[in-house]
Amino acid sequence: MPVSSIDAAARICERGNWQVTNLALQKILYLAHMVYMGRYAGQRLVDAQFEAWDYGPVEPKLYHHVRAFGHKPIGDFFFSAKSLNGTAEGAVLDEACKNFLTKRPAELVAITHQPNTAWAKNYVPGVRGIVIPDRDIYDEYRLRTGSQG
């Protein structure tokens, strides 16, 4: 069963010592979601849809939840977040943090903006509200890893 994007975001921000921006959070969460779907036969990591926005994949409810921080790091205000310790979801999020927390936001945008990604297939400049279908996210994982499954 997917976890809430708030629970996942709290884990990413905590692992990033509360120095993660909204843009970086969105990209890391998306990449973790993609990896989770790829490893677990299309199962969703989070209980929300990603949309194709100008700066890449965005989970809109989470974006609006943390947008008050602007371009500054997101503080510890995920008061109702549940622990993901000892779960497959927590492990995939931790792996994504290890791989991507050191990247600058522009590097994360470049990763999600590559040709043939799920974002690229669904993006329309300046338009919000276009959902990136799960099938496209799963296909992106397969493309990136060379997986046939």
Image: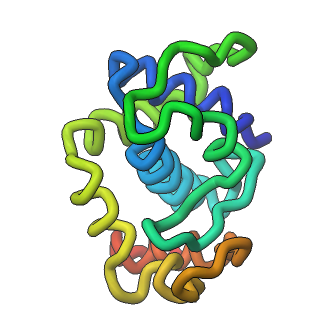
Residue drawn 68% across the image and 54% down it:
60
Which percent across, then down, holds residue 87? 60, 25
The quarter of the picture where residue 65 lies is top right
| 121, above or below 140, in the image | below
Q: Nearer the viewer, residue 53 or 138?
A: 53
Figure quadrant of residue 10: top right
Q: Which quadrant does the N terminus fall into?
A: top right
Left/right of residue 58 with respect to residue 145 in the rendered view: right
Query: Between 147 and 130, which is closer to the camera in this rendering?
Result: 130
Q: Is residue 108 above or below residue 5?
A: below
Left or right: 37 with respect to 114?
A: right
At horizontal 62% and vertical 46% (from top left) the residue drawn is 63
In this view, the residue in front, 76 or 87, is 76
Q: Position of residue 11 (x, y in %)?
A: 51, 24
Give the residue drawn at x 56%, y 17%: 86
Q: Residue at x 58, y 33 (%)?
A: 68
75 vs 104, left or right, is right
Estimate the x, y position of residue 115 in percent, counting from the top left.
35, 87
